[in-house]
Image (spheres, rainbow, N blue to C red):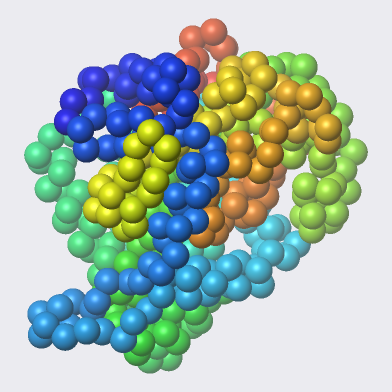
Amino acid sequence: MTTPQHPEDFLSSLRLRSAREDGVFWVDDQRLGIFEPEAARRVSATNWHHFVLQDRLVDMVRRRRSPEVRWSLIRSTWLTQLHTLATAQQHGLLIERMERVLDARAGQDTDLTMLMQDVALRSLLPVALGGLTGAEAELVRRDLEMKLSRLVSATPGGVLHHLRHVAVQVRAGLVVRRVLRQRARGRRGREPDLTDPFVDLLPELGMDRALDVVTTVLTAIGGPPGTAAASVLYEFVRNPEWQRRLEAELAAVDPVEFRTAPTRAAPVTHRFVKEVLRMWSPPLLLVRRSTFAFDLGRTRLEPGQWYLLSPHLIHRDERVWQRPDVFDPDRFLPGAPHGPANRTCYVPFGWAPKKCVGANVAVVQLMALCHLLCTRYRLTVPDPEAVTMALRFAPVPENFRGRLTFR
Ligand code: HEM
């Protein structure tokens, strides 16, 4: 398997080949690229049809089957919990946590990409796993930050960094186990978070499977939300015209309505966020293993073979988007000729039935960030021309230095 050294080169070669080969082609001898919107939808829909959790460790050791738990149960449990958290009060708490991080850094010259990671992670951690002590939260955050730094770094960290990370990872895993156990025994309070429903499912899941479920959410909040927030800032800085439009809308918006239903209260800002997520969708590539055989026209995907999906490549495909490299939120106006031709063309949160469960929280958070940038702070970036977008595991703005000051 050969992969060009720079992710940017790899991705642009995929984009060129995708245009030539109708979006479905063997990237190398082991991985099929499925970058044609309808094929990506179809394979995703079937592949996870009967996806179940792995057996419990103890049962694997004893060579017996665990009670079967379907992934769809895990997802519906998350979605039910997120539905109860979709209130103005919870949105308000999320925004307050974002403010706290930003207030503490106001006035300082700072790396805005790192700041956005911090804002996203600190504000979302209580949604995933709340009620932690300061030391516990610090450990869980360190684990996620180390994971992320390996993914976004241009240079891999080396063996020592890897070993250090394994040690932190083990300790963070122990924190999650302790929280689950203590909540189950009534020694720790229950929290309105994405971990809590699994406390009641512990007998059925077992501790190691429950840990995997919580880790999936933690990993999900540790990467894409922060890079997406940095991309929002990036386009905000590059588009003064849109800054003014957002400021005009958000200065006039009713705060209660904004917390209750931000997409309805601020449609211009919603379009802006949607366009940022089209241009700069994290993660750039999803690697999946096929569990079924798929007939994809000129080629077949057999069970056990690997395939790649990419919201980013679909969003930059000239066959489905007009002028895909141009940033224009108004393409999301109803009926816009350069808008999405159909639902399969706009997939920043992936594909059913594995689609991101946190999509609504993510949009609320990014819109809240725009609100803060337009009403509470002023953003100054002394050298906007120096900022570039690096394509790593996700789009990551580089040389992004600046400062936020209070209005
Ligand atoms: C802008 C922010 C975000 C982006 C762009 C994003 C994107 C994605 C994508 C592309 C996937 C994979 C979907 C697939 O395999 O087809 C995913 C999965 C997931 N996301 Fe997000 N996400 C974001 C924020 C969040 C947040 C805030 C949460 C939690 C509150 C979350 C929770 C999850 C979970 C749990 C999964 C795994 C779903 C599963 O395996 O069934 N995400 N996300």
Does residue 279 lie above or below 289 as drawn?
Answer: above
Q: Quadrant of the N terminus?
A: top left
| Left/right of residue 173 with respect to residue 229 in the rendered view | left
- Determine the image quadrant of residue 153: top left
Q: Position of residue 99 (x, y in %)?
A: 63, 46
Residue at image coords 30%, 31%: 26
| Left/right of residue 353 with respect to residue 338 in the rendered view | left
Q: Quadrant of the C terminus?
A: top right
Q: Position of residue 310 (x, y in %)?
A: 45, 36
| Left/right of residue 221 with respect to residue 103 in the rendered view | left
Q: Position of residue 334 (x, y in %)?
A: 83, 35
Residue at image coords 23%, 63%: 171
- Res. 141 visible in picture: no
Q: Position of residue 181 (x, y in %)?
A: 33, 83
Q: Nearer the viewer, residue 205 or 287?
A: 287
Q: Nearer the viewer, residue 151 or 74?
A: 74
- Res. 295 visible in picture: yes
| Left/right of residue 402 with respect to residue 66 in the rendered view | right
Residue at image coords 27%, 54%: 303
